[in-house]
Image (tube, grey):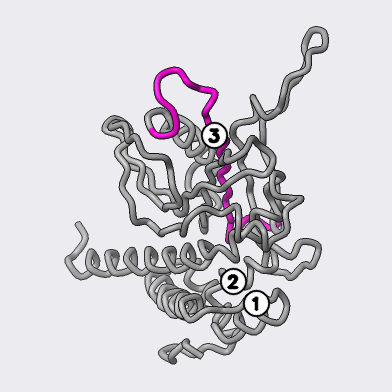
Amino acid sequence: MKTQTTVASDLDTWQEERKLDEACCRLVANKVILARLLHSVVQEYKDCSVTDLERFYLEGEPSIMATAVDQDIPDPGRIKGETTVDKSLSEGTITYDILFSAYSPKRKKNSQVIINVENQVQWNPGYSLLQRAAFYYGRMLSRQKGTVFTGSDYGKLQKVYTIWICLEPPKLKQNTITVFSMEPKQLVGTAEYDKIKYDMATVILVCLGEEERRESDILRLLQILLSPEIRPGQKKQVLEQEYGIPMTVEMEREAENMCNYGRSLAVKYEEKGFERGRSLARKYEEKGFERGRSLAR
């Protein structure tokens, strides 16, 4: 049985892990970042400029882990820009890191798609991330009954995207972006179908890497933005000079939080004897951090 001190230590570690996750989500949930992410990985927005995507297609301001939605109680309101906990009486609780609606330039007027973005640290948590992603998009589709449409009006069903930003993928999958979507396969004869009618769910894995690559700017942007080992001042310099993204006071604060929570967790993991702690500690030492020093600058 764990001692009270051990339980308190585990709880403290969990709370800091959650704070680090929230800081990551708040950075990604900025419209200026979401616009670049969607433009780079979602086919529907390939022909949009990043500026137009940010101004005209992203709806509302995505909030982070703020709204609880009971799926078993129909809600007549439409899904708006929100991060939410989707709770079912029979299936437990699912937490979406970021969940929001966006207008689609490829569909009929005022049509929307629903987009989920997840920041995922652990590549192999005991199951395949693709299976978890499939569960997520299944829930994103089914929760539309009673919110987006009622009865049997399935023609109003909105397409869903679940985008997984994998922070620590295995070496062979680093610096890759992979799209999984529905495609027809003709078994007998030839028949044509309108893709917009059947391709209702897409999974996208964005796998970051430790080595810098310039083939895809979005990989480099996310790697710098979401690395807790890179100081806020360095992030600000890269964002502003290379990407023309002004780093707001709020973004700088979240970047600072990431840095501090990340360093604190590295120390705690190391004290617990976790290999992840030793690995993180080495990364911080390589970046010039010292144990106990403030990480704000």
| Secondary element type, mark 1 | helix
Can you identify the residue that label 2 sits on?
Answer: 225
**Is 29 drawn above or below residue 84 in the view shown?**
below
Determine the image quadrant of residue 28: bottom right
Mark 2–mark 1 Cα distance, whole angstroms, equals 8 Å
Mark 3 or mark 1: name the one nearer the start of the chain: 3
Task: Inspect the magenta stretch and tell me whether residue 155 lies in it.
Answer: yes
Q: Are marks 3 and 2 in contact (CB under 8 Å)?
A: no
- Does residue 217 appear left or right of residue 204 in this picture? right
Pinpoint residue 80: horizontal percent, then vertical percent: 44, 47
Task: Inspect the magenta stretch and tell me whether residue 109 lies in it.
Answer: no
Can you identify the residue that label 1 sits on?
Answer: 239
- Residue located 40% across and 59% down the image: 64
Say what amino acid the circle numbered 2 marks: Leu
Say what amino acid the circle numbered 1 marks: Leu
Mark 3–mark 2 Cα distance, whole angstroms, equals 30 Å
- Does residue 253 appear left or right of residue 108 in this picture? left
Determine the image quadrant of residue 272: bottom left
Give the residues in magenta.
147-172
- Does residue 87 appear left or right of residue 226 in this picture? left
Crowdedness near tag 3: few (<14), some (14–19) or many (≥20) residues, C-alpha within 10 Å: many
Determine the image quadrant of residue 63: bottom left
Q: Are marks 3 and 1 in contact (CB under 8 Å)?
A: no
Pinpoint residue 179: horizontal percent, then vertical percent: 69, 43
- Residue located 66% across and 68% down the image: 221
Q: Residue 158 bears which disc, if any?
A: 3
Q: Are marks 2 and 1 in contact (CB under 8 Å)?
A: yes
